[in-house]
Image (tube, rainbow, N blue to C red):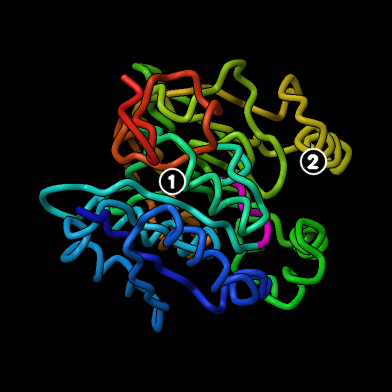
Amino acid sequence: MQRSLLFLVNPKAGKAEIKNNLLDIIDQFVKADWKVIVRTTQYSGEITDVLKDEASQYDLVVCAGGDGTLNETVGGLLKSDGHRPWLGYIPAGTTNDFAVSLGIPRNAQQAADAIVNGRAFPCDVGLFDDRHFVYVAAFGAFTEVSYSTPQQFKNALGRAAYILEGIRHLAEIKTYQLTVEHNGEQIHGEFIFGMISNSISVGGFKMNARANVSMNDGLLEVLLVKKPRNPVELQSAIGALLLNDFNNECLYTFHASELRIFSEEEISWTLDGEFGGNLRDVRIKVAHKAYEIIVPAGKEDEKVAVVNGDSGE
């Protein structure tokens, strides 16, 4: 029996590469003996609505778009009942952090080829109260950049657009008095930025201090930036982030499977680059190996199923 593939395309995401190569990508799937159903997204949240009811009808769901499209797709898979299909991802956003972390090619046709010939990798996902994030939840300095930067700037400048927009907001940096609970410990202090991630790259930069970070080890990477005492310390902290130097005294890093962050005032959060709400108290934990995403063959050393052939067990 021919296997079925649902191809979800966000025509507004990032550059026009997907639209320009759409027929070639579909042809790749058809030649690999997939029955392809194509659906373009029409409104925010549509993908989640569709998949929670229809995901079990397919063997593979492929989404083409940016981080927001990926977030919606994973959300739909998590909410679906019964059989949960594999996920294929063709990145079409600006920085495509999650794709970079998994070694998924930036080129659309190469990404499609990786789906056809790749392996299914069981991946963790972050749970944020009753919501989720695929690769990052963040607050504070620079977090507004991802959804305040005009799309035309993102398309033209890529990662530089985020940097330029971030510099523009330097004078608006706010401090938050936080209590952070994790691994049986409590942290109290003033912070200007926080990030909880399941990714090697965030904002186009490698952001993990821990060696041998895995996307399915049941742990989230946490980075907190303490309030600098003066402008020199602020510049030093920013420079340390750009250079991936996590020994800076303003940076606090750890990993955890679960944590709670409480603030004396509401914090504006982002989830995978989209607005995540204004909250004072959040509980964050990892859902271990919650779904399977296709990665290029040989990318991960774990034994997983081969998509276009027999089981890898």
Which is nearer the eye, 270 or 286? 286
Residue furthest to the bottom: 42
Q: Give the range drawn in magenta.
A: 94-98
Q: Quadrant of the C terminus?
A: top left
Which is nearer the eye, 127 or 268? 127
Tell whether 171 sits left or right of 1: right
Residue 96 among those drawn in magenta: yes
Q: Position of residue 77 (x, y in %)?
A: 27, 53
Q: Judging from the image, what secondary structure is the residue with disc 2 in? A: helix
Residue 305 among those drawn in magenta: no
Tell whether 23 sits left or right of 39: right
- Specify the amino acid type for callout 1: Ser
The tag on residue 263 is: 1
Cα separation between marks 2 and 1: 23 Å
The image shows residue 143, relative to residue 298, as above or below, that is below
- Specify the amino acid type for callout 2: Ile
- Label 2–label 1 contact, CB within 8 A: no
Q: Where is residue 139 in the image (x, y as percent from the top left)?
A: 54, 51
Q: Which residue is drawn at 74% across and 19% down?
A: 247
Q: Quadrant of residue 213?
A: top right
Q: Where is residue 260 in the image (x, y as percent from the top left)?
A: 36, 35
Q: Judging from the image, what secondary structure is the residue with disc 1 in? A: strand
Please report whichever mark, 2 or 1, sits nearer to the chain's N-terminal start. 2
